[in-house]
Amino acid sequence: MALTKQGRRNRIKKRIRKIVSGTADRPRMTVFRSNKEIYVQLVDDQSGKTILSASSREKELAKVSGTKSDVAAAVGKAVGEKALKSGIKTVIFDRNGYLYHGRVKQLAEGAREAGLKF
């Protein structure tokens, strides 16, 4: 029986998560995209806590107009700026089973523009 799109993503996600793990000084930057919104979190896997997050639903980011890719780039910049303010310079990027193109790529490039290294 063929995998559904969600099942395929979950299989890729598990394969990535076997390798990728975040720490307090180098957290895992995980991305979730829905049809309308995009969310990103910096997670410390050792303590099991989210350090900070950003999404396209935040007040200042909800005002961004343009395509969903433009909004994703703005969310990437926002999470990069928040991370630098809290003293985080490097992260491990977790694309969460999504292909690295479109909104996920724009978010990553926006975070790099803000100064995050990964």
Image (cartoon, rainbow, N blue to C red):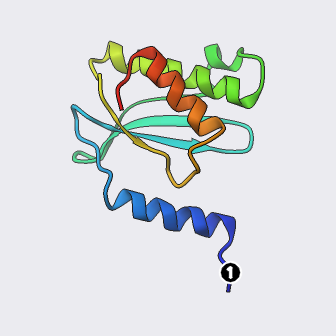
Position of the C terminus by quadrant? top left
Q: Residues within 10 Å of mark 1 (few under 14, many from 20)?
A: few
How many circles with numbers are drawn on the protein? 1
Say which of 88 and 106 sits in front.
106
**Which residue is the site of mark 1?**
2
Residue 74 image position (x, y, % from top left): 60, 20
Position of the N terminus by quadrant? bottom right
The residue most toward the front is 101
From the viewer's perspective, is residue 112 above or below residue 41? above
- The residue depicted at 72 percent of the width and 14 percent of the height is 63
Left or right side of 57 for 36: right
From the viewer's perspective, is residue 3 above or below residue 97? below
Say which of 57 and 4 sits in front.
4
- The residue depicted at 64 percent of the width and 36 percent of the height is 103
- The residue depicted at 47 percent of the width and 59 percent of the height is 13
Left or right side of 107 for 50: left
The residue most toward the bottom is 1
From the viewer's perspective, is residue 24 above or below residue 2? above
Residue 57 image position (x, y, % from top left): 64, 27
Residue 115 image position (x, y, % from top left): 39, 16
From the viewer's perspective, is residue 48 above or below residue 78? below
- The residue depicted at 58 percent of the width and 50 percent of the height is 99
Where disc 1 sits, the SS reads loop
Asked which quadrant contains residue 68, the reply is: top right
Asked which quadrant contains residue 38, the reply is: top right
Q: Amino acid at mark 1?
A: Ala
Residue 58 image position (x, y, % from top left): 61, 22
